[in-house]
């Protein structure tokens, strides 16, 4: 017997329940469909997908690549291949749910076996509920409930017996067929530096986890907020594309926490970050419009502005605030931004420039290699103050104070804003404060070598708080 395995955001062999089930039932026809329905993948994530699929095809010994609507493609593939059924791991975003629900219904209509499995989260979104049976809206309570539940063991995946049907449109090397999808940028190649930072694929994910455990885990609890230090896992794109299962990561870190008491605080903090991924997934599952609509609907009345010059300065890393600009430049050059800096940069867009958080969510969707439909939307709403468990709206990050606290020596700033590298550390987070003689010795001219701030922090904070006061007044009247 032969069964189709649909790969989507689970581009791995290890701990892949759908692949295990298909192997146990007979031969495996591995398939990836570049879907024409739903939200198109962002540019940076598309670069990652191209390379991850290349590695998956190599590991499997081949991969059927299709483009279009699965509801149209799979029945035809079943006819052409003689497959007996279709297996996949469940998705939890509205586009994925809609597609998979329609596909399962279509397959049942034609009498084909169709099975889905839990392979992408620690817990299914409907498994963790409050005492009253409702979804959680506060992370700390959600995570306490999760910690009372057992995490399923990893599944051992035997070497699958791959069957590649002789299909006319599947001839030629995988790289050649992938190239037709246009996932790699060319004119210009804005992803030219990505390969120096990342190794997509299952082997790359395992190597990255090893490196984090050996070099970054000790000190993670405190060091994770420091963009100038190596205490970050950089596992997010590997988890987003499922090149390693979250259960594999969980059990590796939980085991270390149990046997190495000196690492326990660091391990528990990292496990809680996996918990935020779970929290975001269940938020999206229960709120399918999370990427487009305020979770806290009173923010529908917030007086957002649309300063196009400010938006362009933010996108290009030219706001005049070094920590914000360093983060936005890191994002453009690598497809990634340190998490602390993401919060500061997001706060700047929504509270200093008062752009709607959706504009930032869209930009990150296109520029992050780890752009995930749940994490991206939930995190932007959290920063904006309108999401679940949101930071209070009056918590407005001061980008200068944040820089001095979390990049005290200016190491991160100097890397991504080299025009500031010669300034003394005392002034690197607020270069406009440097006296003329200091600027002269540094070969630096404020406003020319680097822009003046495009907005005054105190004024921006006052305006943002006035906007918040206005919606509170509107709610009280309503």
Image: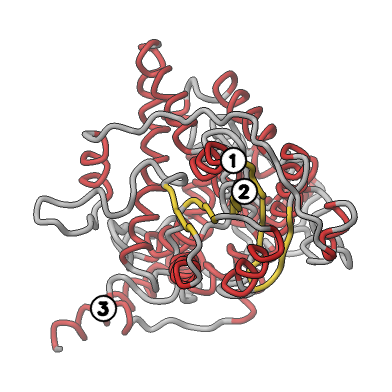
Q: Disc 2 marks which residue?
A: 2
Q: Nearer the viewer, residue 353 or 401?
A: 353
Between label 2 and label 3, give the one nearer the viewer: 2
Mark 3 or 1: in front is: 1
Displayed quadrant of residue 329: bottom right
Residue at 61% in and 37% down: 13
Determine whether, in the image, residue 8 is placed left or right of residue 461: right
Where is residue 22 shown, x and y percent of the image? 55, 43
Identify which residue is drawn at 78% across, 58% down.
449
Residue 224 % position (x, y): 49, 35
Mark pair 3, 1: CA separation = 54 Å
**Numbered label attached to residue 26:** 1
Q: Check whether the beta carbons of the residues at disc 2 and disc 1 lie within 8 A of each other.
A: yes
Extreme residue toward the left, this view = 132
Along the viewing direction, whichever of 186 and 448 lies nearer the viewer: 186
| Disc on the earlier residue, 3 or 1 | 1
């Amino acid at each position: 017997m032969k069964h189709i395995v649909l790969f989507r955001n689970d581009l791995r062999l290890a701990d892949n329940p759908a692949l295990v089930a298909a192997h146990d039932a007979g031969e495996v026809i591995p398939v990836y469909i570049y879907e024409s329905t739903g939200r198109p993948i962002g540019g940076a994530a598309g670069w990652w997908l191209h390379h991850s699929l290349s590695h998956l095809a190599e590991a499997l010994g081949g991969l059927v690549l299709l483009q279009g609507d699965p509801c149209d493609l799979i029945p035809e593939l079943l006819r052409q291949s003689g497959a007996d059924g279709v297996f996949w791991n469940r998705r939890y975003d509205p586009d994925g749910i809609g597609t998979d629900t329609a596909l399962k219904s279509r397959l049942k209509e034609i009498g084909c076996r169709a099975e889905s499995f839990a392979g992408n989260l620690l817990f299914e979104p409907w498994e963790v509920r409050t005492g009253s049976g409702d979804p959680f809206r506060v992370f700390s309570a959600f995570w306490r409930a999760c910690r009372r539940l057992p995490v399923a063991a990893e599944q051992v995946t035997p070497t699958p017996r791959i069957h590649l049907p002789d299909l006319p449109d599947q001839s030629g090397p995988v790289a050649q067929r992938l190239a037709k999808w246009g996932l790699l940028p060319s004119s210009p190649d804005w992803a030219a530096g990505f390969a120096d930072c990342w190794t997509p694929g299952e082997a790359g994910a395992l190597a990255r986890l090893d490196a984090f455990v050996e070099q970054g885990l000790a000190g993670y609890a405190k060091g994770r907020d420091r963009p100038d230090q190596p205490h970050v896992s950089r596992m997010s794109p590997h988890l987003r594309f499922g090149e390693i299962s979250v259960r594999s990561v969980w059990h590796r870190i939980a085991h270390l926490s149990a046997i190495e008491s000196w690492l326990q605080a660091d391990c528990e903090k990292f496990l809680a970050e996996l918990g935020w991924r779970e929290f975001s997934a269940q938020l999206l599952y229960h709120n399918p419009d999370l990427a487009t609509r305020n979770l806290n609907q009173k923010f529908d009345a917030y007086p957002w502005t649309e300063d196009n010059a400010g938006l362009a300065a933010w996108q290009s890393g030219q706001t005049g605030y070094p920590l914000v600009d360093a983060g936005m430049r890191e994002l453009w050059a690598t497809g990634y931004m340190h998490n602390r800096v993401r919060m500061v940069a997001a706060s700047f867009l929504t509270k200093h420039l008062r752009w709607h958080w959706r504009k930032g969510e869209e930009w990150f969707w296109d520029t992050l290699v780890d752009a995930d439909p749940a994490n991206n939307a939930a995190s932007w709403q959290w920063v904006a103050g309108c999401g679940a468990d949101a930071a209070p709206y009056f918590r407005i990050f001061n980008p200068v104070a944040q820089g001095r606290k979390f990049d005290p020596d200016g190491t991160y700033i100097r890397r991504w804003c080299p025009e500031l590298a010669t300034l003394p550390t005392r002034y690197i987070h607020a270069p406009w404060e440097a006296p003329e003689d200091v600027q002269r010795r540094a070969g630096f001219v404020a406003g020319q070598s680097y822009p003046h701030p495009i907005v005054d922090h105190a004024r921006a904070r006052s305006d943002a708080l006035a906007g918040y006061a206005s919606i509170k007044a509107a709610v009280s009247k309503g």
